[in-house]
Image (cartoon, rainbow, N blue to C red):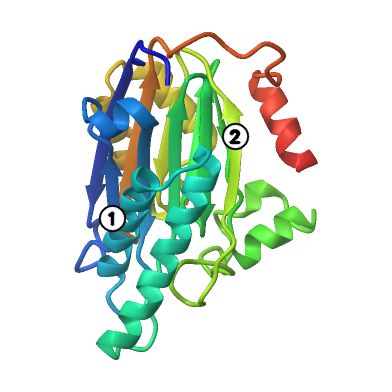
Amino acid sequence: MPDEAPEIEAHALTDTGQVRQDNQDAVRCCHPNDDLTVRHGHLYGVADGMGGFAHGGIASAFALEALFKAFYAHQGTPAQRLCQGVQDANLGIYQMAIRMGVGRMGTTLTAVHLAGHTLHVAHVGDSRAYLVRDRQATCLTQDHTRVGELVRLRLLSPDKVRTHQQRSVLDKCLGLELFVQPDVFAVPVRPGDRIVLCTDGVWGFVEDRDIADFAAAESSMEGFNRAVMDAAIRGGSDDNLSLLSLRFGSLAGAPEPGAPESTVAGLFRRWFRR
């Protein structure tokens, strides 16, 4: 890791919402001055426990705990350590459900790791990671849902996802099978970028363009998170709501020579070539 430390503003906000009785979401931020963070980079994550199964709140909290523990304990590249963390979380939840005799437990998990000018993303489920740049919000993740598959097959327009009756029917999450295959990929970032991690109780009721508008209007990360969450509640969110937002000041080191194009349009094009 380079000697200089990146400047990162981070703020997390989670709320039970207006309908649910308990909060099954979980959020976690690294400790910026911790020795492991300094040596191995900054890690952040959100998880949304599945309300249809037992103990969703336990599953989401455990997933983040296992991810962070494995990431900072194992060797390898950031992508390898993220994969190991996701696998440890998945297996741990699967085994916990057996020990507790509760049938099945499940959760989504979306996490990002910053090292230098590279953001690594690990993703399972339908929580989302957004990049906000140049007054545009680009969703970096693909929803692992039946509706998300229709979008990938070009059978459904992305703007129809939020109103689809099966929007929240997951095809993939942690805890239901012995093994899970996460999406893990890298995105070049630059100073001034914002990253927004959020559960579907947020993005399902706030349009992408509104996320960008709030980012332009709110100078503080706390104010931004509150504005987005309030908009989701006004929009009729019937779920728990969680956001974890980052804004990058200076970043460690210089961009790698020949780094991939880093415009929002370029990121969007590369995503659909994956």
Residue at (29% x, 40% y) in the render: 230
Crowding near the residue tagged with mark 2, few <14, some 14–19, many ≥20 C-alpha atoms within 10 Å = some
Quadrant in the rendering for residue 104? bottom left
Q: Secondary structure at mark 1?
A: helix
Q: Is residue 252 visible?
A: yes
Percent across and percent down for residue 58 are 25, 68
State which quarter of the image contains the N terminus: top left
Q: Secondary structure at mark 2?
A: strand
Percent across and percent down for residue 205 are 44, 48
Residue at (27% x, 19% y) in the render: 220
**Residue found farthest to the front:** 75
Crowding near the residue tagged with mark 1, few <14, some 14–19, many ≥20 C-alpha atoms within 10 Å = some
State which quarter of the image contains the C terminus: top right
In this rendering, would 161 be left or right of 233?
Answer: right
- Badge 2 is on which residue? 186
- Badge 1 is on which residue? 65
Three-letter code, disc 2: Ala
Question: Total marks drawn?
Answer: 2
Q: Nearer the viewer, residue 204 or 244?
A: 244
Distance from label 2 to label 1 (Cα)?
Answer: 22 Å
Vertical arrangement, residue 198 with respect to residue 57, above or below: above
Vertical arrangement, residue 84 with respect to residue 251, above or below: below
Percent across and percent down for residue 224 are 31, 28
Three-letter code, disc 1: Glu
Percent across and percent down for residue 116 are 48, 20
Q: Earlier in the sequence, mark 2 or mark 1?
A: 1
Q: Do tag 2 and tag 1 residues touch (Cβ < 8 Å)?
A: no
